[in-house]
Amino acid sequence: MKKFVTAIAVAVLVAFAAPALAATNPFMDVPMNHWAYDAIGQLAAHGVLSGYPDGLYRGKQPTTRYEMASALARALALVDMTKASKQDVEMLKKLVIEFKDELEALGVRVDDLDKRVAVIEDRLGGWKLSGQLRVDITDQDRDPDPDSAVKVSRARIFMDRWFGEDESMHFHARLDGTNGPVSFSRFFVEMPFFWDSQLTVGRFSWDMEEDYYLGGSTSIFGIMSGGLDSILTDRVIEGFGWTKNFGMGNFRAYLAHPRVFTDDTGLALSGNPLWGFNPETGNFGSLRIDAWELMMMAQLQFTEQFGFDIGAQVFFGDNAWNSNFSFENLWTIFAGLRFNFNENIALKGIFYHQQANVDFWGWTGAGWGWIDANLPDANAYKAIVDVKQDALKFTSLWLEYAHYDGGFVIPTGVNSLFYDDISRSGLHFFNSVLPTDLSVWRVAGKQNWNEKWSTFFYVAGYNADNLGWNGLNWVDAKAFQWGLGILHYYNPNVTFGLSYSNIDWKRNAENTGFADDHVFRFRTHVSF
């Protein structure tokens, strides 16, 4: 367990300055019959507290309040939460209140100790159990098939356990039961590793791009979500992750062997990017790629204003079956820029460059065989202005423009680029591959009116050439979408949300394959 800095500072102060301080400003003795002796003795006997100064108990010689306060501060830094009962936590809180003045005289922030005790209480017994429940009432006027439903859209149970020396190791599991049988979507352990780093082992999900998409680090939609996501990360993977913090930032990397772009692992959404005939097996089927994945990213914060991110994602292997495509490797390198004009206004941008090496089965001129697809390099980029509500007073503001080249492969799935609950009928998107160029712009904002109420809005435009099929011809796909919503924070555990979303496809005589859509949603979100 990490020891908070204040408690360590107190320990150093006690070791070097206690005699002088006691001589110049002695505290009153704690009477021998005071309940604090029994309290600390009980906590020590239970193994909850340790690390208090030698000589705290000296037979019948009373301890000063100063010594008792310093003992409490040091002991709280070393508390063993796996051995704490509810009564022990209540005793700790009572001790902090009793010696509040002495702790403050030592320079210890009592509110920090209160937070520390709150963390102890939260992790009582070493285990923490929590969960989320979302229930949606939805009315969707989708042409030609409207739909209304009441649905449990999220059912999650989280389990956490802190263990090991100083509780430095952390186990986390997440049970999901929204669709189909209940299963563990997260199951991993975090532990200290060499060179003062951290190792993550198991099934986990890291979002390394959260600063660069609406709904990541920006909580405009609150519980209503937005359907947007990272384009490379924030997928469930099974493997090893490594994190190293240093003075000006951190480095993160993971190694996994996912079967990417496929349904059966749940790693990359529904649908598949490619489907075809495998001439070697004589079967039709969807593409499944068994490949190694290596992801690396360095986040550098040069000053409070200027930050820079750089990284690479590599899929490498040659094992695609049930498809007429043979996958060799896919490289994506990216660089992001974060510049804070002040604490409320930031400029962000990220650029991706991708190269895919793929063979396909075709006519070679001399017969059928594997041919290099010779795919061109593909790029993608975003430019963002992020304004917090404190700057404009009445609303926050997110301004974004993004462009994706045709052929760009999106491991999280093309759906990550769209808000949820809109109809994309007629759009010939594969799950993870953009068949043509796509441009997107967005404007969104959230208004926090008070502790109980907030509202939000968004507008967005999508433009792609020759992406829709009207039954006869390929046609341009252009859409305009807007939405708004209101959130009511009923209590710390329950939030209600009402939202409306509308999408309008720019149709003409040739463009009849797209479906306009609008969605009303009432959501109840419970966390416990």
Image (cartoon, helix red, strand yellow):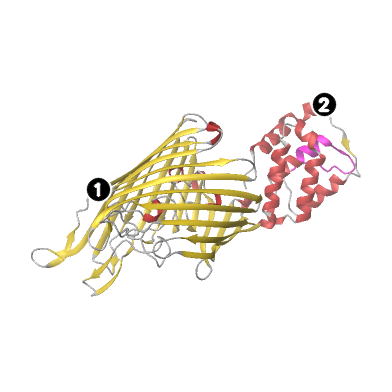
Q: Quadrant of the C terminus?
A: bottom right
Mark 1–mark 2 distance (CA, rounded to whole Å):
73 Å
Is residue 456 visible to us here?
yes
Q: Residue at x 71, y 30 (%)?
A: 16
Residue where numbered disc 2 is placed: 25
Q: Please, what is the three-letter code of the amino acid marked with disc 1? A: Asp
Q: Is residue 59 magenta?
A: yes
Q: Which residue in the structure is indicated by mark 1?
A: 377
Quick check: 103 above or below 478? above
Q: Quadrant of residue 453?
A: top right
**Pointer 1 local density, CA inside 10 Å: few below 14, some 14–19, many at least 20:** some
Q: Does residue 428 sit above or below 166 in this rendering? A: below
Q: On the rendered structure, is 341 left or right of 12?
A: left
| Extent of the magenta region | 52-71
Sooner in the amino-acid sequence: mark 1 or mark 2: 2
> In what element is the residue under mark 2?
loop
